[in-house]
Image (spheres, rainbow, N blue to C red):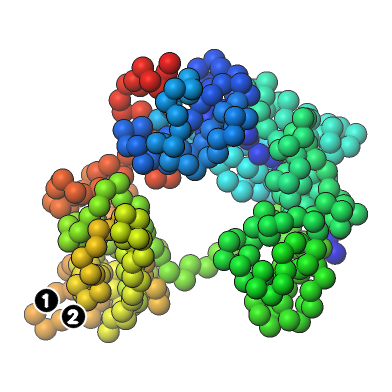
Amino acid sequence: MSDNRHILCIDLRGFYASCECVMRGLDPLEAKLAVVGNVERSGSIVLAISPGLKKLGFKNRCRFYELPRDKGIIFAPARMRVYLEYSQKIIEIFLKYVPIEDLHIYSVDESFLDVTESMHLFASNNKEMARVIMEDIYNTTGLFSACGIGPNMLLAKLSLDLEAKKNPDGIAYWNYNDVEKKLWPVMPLSKMWGIGVNLEKSLNSMGMYKVGDIANYDLKRLINKFGVIGEELYYHSRGIDRSRMQNPHIIRDHNYGIGQTLFEDYYENIKIVMLEQCEELGMRIRLKKQMGRTIHLSIGYSKDVGGGGFSRQMTLDEPTNLTSEIYDACKQLFNTFYDGRPIRKITISIGKLTADRPLQLGLFEKRDKMQRLAYAMDEIRGKFGKGSILRGVSYLDKATSIRRTKLIGGHYAELEYHETKEMVK
């Protein structure tokens, strides 16, 4: 079992929506506000709702058209750059209380702080420490937060998700003695951090429906079924987490990919977006000084025709990082497996990576010149922005690259149009 530390997991409540409320002089706990990815499209995702709107039973990640227009809801277009600026202010607050090695930024609105070594400077116990930091966040930014506390990152996160967000003061503390009483009864299993819907189905098929069922299952059978994940499930269900924020986790890239969900149906014209994605993918792997041999194309069909799609890959004779060669492989896969149904999602990835090296010359082409040209274009983009050099195809009606250069995290960085009366009523 890991040592008994004081870990805080702090979540900014309804972060994007709360930022919009604060900028409008509204109380996030009372205002009814929703942040929408694109207010000009009824099918756009609702990225966040204010705590005030959440109290009425609405949830994040619904579609824009699912929210009523007659309830006085404010619909705010996403402004990712502004939210990142707020996030940076929060990080600066955290660094007043812990050194950077004791801070782990889990997402734009959620962070872990190990206050074991610094708590005595600000508070007499971990709950008081949480209150001090949460009050600083509110006084500085006007944003409300919630905090889960535990002896390790796992229990801090679980206490946040399963209790703190429901408590009036937004704080919960779980220790190892609370696991059997508070964690074991949790069901469905997907409510536990780290268990997705597919894993939940597999565990259900083995007779496990509550977290306590995992804790009392045979460890060897879990490992035989799920490998390392099975062992991790067993120990996590008992509240045991050996990870430490001070030990950095190195992520090794095994492939690179890019994908997007489209706002309208595409057919053969998907090749416009396909070429744009291949261009960006090629740039990414060149920046990493790598090449790949396996090209993977995944196409998702519209829900209007029942969804589905296909996912296929092919291995090239020689590794590449050239846009044209990645695109040729994708076209071959598409022409072979596409059945004519409307397309709403496309993902392309490249794997079997190797270190970059001079490309083998073909009989009738100079691949090395193509590679030098690609690197020259990358250098210009690095200096002047991704949109400084685009292929001609990106200026066609069905292209998406120009719009995507204005996005952060898939959403608009800043407003490019005035809000309508409906948005601010």
The answer to whether 279 appears left or right of 185 in the picture is: left
Quick one: SS at disc 1?
loop
Residue 357 at what x, y percent from top left? 32, 75
- What type is the residue that disc 2 sits on? Leu
Q: In the figure, 34 relative to 285: above or below? A: above
| Residue contact between numbered discs 2 and 1, judged by CB atoms under 8 Å | yes
Return the residue nearer the eye: 416 or 162.
162
Q: CA distance from mark 2 to mark 1?
A: 7 Å
Residue 98 at what x, y percent from top left? 74, 40
The N terminus sits in image quarter:
bottom right
At a point 69% along the width and 75% down the height, the residue shown is 206
Residue matched to label 1: 365
- What type is the residue that disc 1 sits on? Glu
Residue matched to label 2: 361
At a point 74% along the width and 50% down the height, the residue shown is 158
At a point 25% along the width and 58% down the height, the residue shown is 342
Residue 383 at what x, y percent from top left? 30, 45
